[in-house]
Amino acid sequence: MKYAIVTGSTKGIGKAIAIRLLREGYYVIVNYSNDDKAAELFEDEVREYKDMYLIIKEKLSNYKNAMSFVKKVKEKINYIDCMVFNCGMTDRSAFRDISKDSWEQVINTNLNVPFYILQQLDGSIQSGGYSIYWLYSGNLSSCKFFRIRGFKSCGTSNGERTCESICG
């Protein structure tokens, strides 16, 4: 069996990726931060895969929550074939109006937390697994894809993506 983690995955692009991975036979760790209704709707939609996923509610915006998430992942699976960092945040205020606290929250969620999670799960990542994609919230044309050592490349690097370009 192959194992995947998709953060921010109970709605939108993350949900589409998680469902695609379930259809491809992956066991998927699904994550969301606060929209319980979306998580319930996700669960209703994937009921046929009832033994193929775990939903973890964890707001991935700081070190403490990232470590809690990692602990829950390690309790369930021993290795990872695919990781998709889809959760993210932005501050749509005018540039000069963005506060220090808001900026630090954006950086923690979009940069630091994925780093902490990868660092803790590094020993669990399968050699030759699929690329880790870092998906930013906001404008799709600004998405950046990062290839991580030892991972096969899949997908596009020009901001266009479909579920077919994620992990397979």
Image (spheres, rainbow, N blue to C red):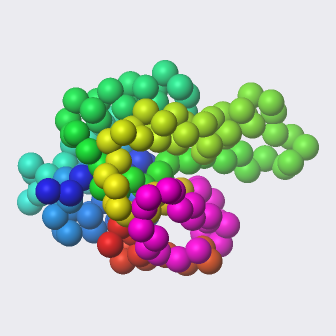
Give residue 160's position: percent from left, percent from top. 55, 78
Figure check: 32 above or below 21: above
Give residue 30's position: percent from left, percent from top. 31, 47
Number of numbered discs visible in the structure rendering: 0
Q: Range of the magenta residues?
A: 136-157
Q: Quadrant of residue 34?
A: top left
Figure check: 38 above or below 74: below
Identify which residue is drawn at 62% across, 59% down.
138
Give residue 135's position: percent from left, percent from top. 54, 58
In the depicted view, which residue is nearer to us: 121 or 31? 121
Describe residue 49's horizontal placement relative to residue 81 as left or right. left
Q: Is residue 80 visible?
A: yes
Furthest residue toward right: 96
Identify which residue is drawn at 14% across, 56% down.
1
Report if residue 147 lies within the magenta region. Answer: yes
Describe residue 16's horizontal placement relative to residue 114 as left or right. left
Describe residue 79's horizontal placement relative to residue 59 as left or right. left
Give residue 156's position: percent from left, percent from top. 53, 77
Identify which residue is drawn at 36% across, 39% down.
123
In the depicted view, which residue is nearer to us: 165 or 14? 165
Identify which residue is drawn at 19% across, 53% down.
27
Figure quadrant of the C terminus? bottom left
Describe residue 167's horizontal placement relative to residue 106 as left or right. left
Report if residue 154 lies within the magenta region. Answer: yes
Q: Is residue 30 visible?
A: no
Magenta stretch mostly in which secondary structure?
loop
